[in-house]
Image (cartoon, rainbow, N blue to C red):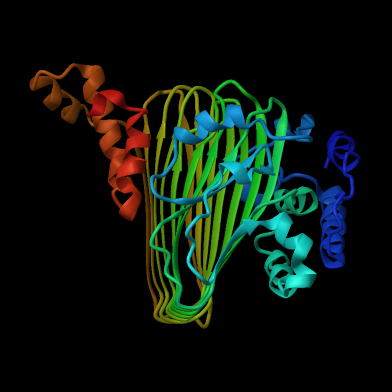
Amino acid sequence: MSALSHSLYVDSYREPATNEPAWLSRARRQALARFEASGFPSPRDEEWRYTHVAPIERKLFTAATGSADTDAAEALIESCRIADAWSLVFVDGMFVPGLSERHGLPAGVTLESLASLLALSEADGNAAWLESGLERETESDRHGFLDFNTAFFTDGAVLRLEEGVALEKPVQLFFVSTRNDGRSTLRNLIRIGRNAEARVVETHVGPPETGYLGAVVNQIEVADNGGLNHYKLQLDGGRAYHFGGSYARVARDGRFGHHLLSLGGLLVRNEVHARLGHAAQTEMNGVFLSENRQHVDNHIRVDHDEPHGSSRVSYRGILEDRSRGVFQGRIVVHADAQKTDAEMNNRNLLLSDDAEIDTKPQLEIHADDVKCAHGVTIGQLDPDSVFYLESRGIDAATAREMLTFAFAAEIVERFGPLRERLRGLLLARFPNAQ
């Protein structure tokens, strides 16, 4: 860690003004001490070898004070709102109840801001599960950004489903940034009870010419035979810095889907880690597009801890101009995880001679009765396919756009009931592909 980042972030730390539980204050101080000792991750760390976060380290992005700019936020929200969904809205790190929608939530569902629950936790009996949820970090997940988030988070979303509750509508969590040089540091807790089901749409959005930092961590727990489909729409402006980490524990017979559409940001790191119990399943699909000088890093880890689990990981990248992409994926099959069925693949399309992709899919297998495979491809558009479309009267630029859209849309088709809305967001990047 450089002295510069120490002076900018550690010295800027202030104890939260609210009366937090003692256990949380203790966790913050411990995280701050680790962050002071180690700092942000650097290319010296194997898991970060392709991504330099020095621009974040050199600049002090600050948390908002006062009231949120809801006027600026509303248009951004409407540009990516999912129809007929419950929602929580955070603008520049601050919860905005007036823009959120919680009317008609069924019994057995908690959808609330983390700060409000922490303020009431001792009185309403939430203290134990909030503490266990927030302290569930593991050594395999922990790094400087996670410690940074623990020390500095100001709020976050909480979604808790009791046993047997199935939400018919999705829940959309908006994280809107409007301030130049602003910072939104949030911690979300999602707990899906036994035999419960939910869809969550995590949405990050900001103005195209505004530079800001978003550091958002999701801690997810899926109980026995529960199910969560988690969609992440990373639609930040072209000058934004984004770190997003999702860390899931999936119990016996549980199901966890993670579906990523990453279209914005100057420097982006999308992490998703899942630990699977007995016969648990995960499906992870992702599409990331980068242009100009964007850098987009996708880091996946799946730990099969127990037998009969299955995992499917499929990511596609499209890179233009002088942009750079990273895909690091690791599936770890532990010694007790016999009968595991795991597959991982990453396909990438380079649309410029100056675009780069670093891809590193890995299998780490410690059991002998398993079925595992992985693969990777890097290439350009097929000239024969472009020529075929041109022979049908389509100009070359439109033909290339159609083929590129089709490459990405094949993954978006796996996004379940939300695929049409998300397909529309993707189509906005390729308007001539219709």
The location of residue 244, given as percent across then percent down, is 60, 47
Instruction: Give the left or right position of residue 94, taking residue 104 as reference.
Output: right
Q: Residue furthest left?
A: 392
- Can residue 328 be seen here? The reply is yes
The location of residue 387, given as percent across then percent down, is 15, 23
| Quadrant location, the N terminus | top right
Which quarter of the figure has residue 404?
top left
Q: Nearer the viewer, residue 296 or 97?
A: 97
Q: Is residue 297 above or below residue 166?
A: above
The location of residue 242, given as percent across then percent down, is 61, 39
Q: Nearer the viewer, residue 326 or 395?
A: 395
Instruction: Give the left or right position of residue 186, taking residue 349 as reference.
Output: right
- Can residue 266 be seen here? The reply is no
Task: Tell me which residue sits at (78%, 60%) in the image.
Answer: 119
Which quarter of the figure has residue 428?
top left
Q: How many marks?
A: 0
| Quadrant location, the C terminus | top left
Task: Tell me which residue sits at (62%, 57%) in the image.
Answer: 112
Task: Tell me which residue sits at (68%, 49%) in the image.
Answer: 186
Instruction: Give the left or right position of residue 231, taking residue 63 as reference.
Output: left
Task: Tell me which residue sits at (36%, 35%) in the image.
Answer: 426
Instruction: Give the left or right position of residue 205, taking residue 180 as reference.
Output: left
Q: Is residue 167 above or below residue 324?
A: below
Q: Residue furthest front?
A: 103
Q: Nearer the viewer, residue 44 or 255?
A: 255
Q: Is residue 330 above or below residue 161?
A: above
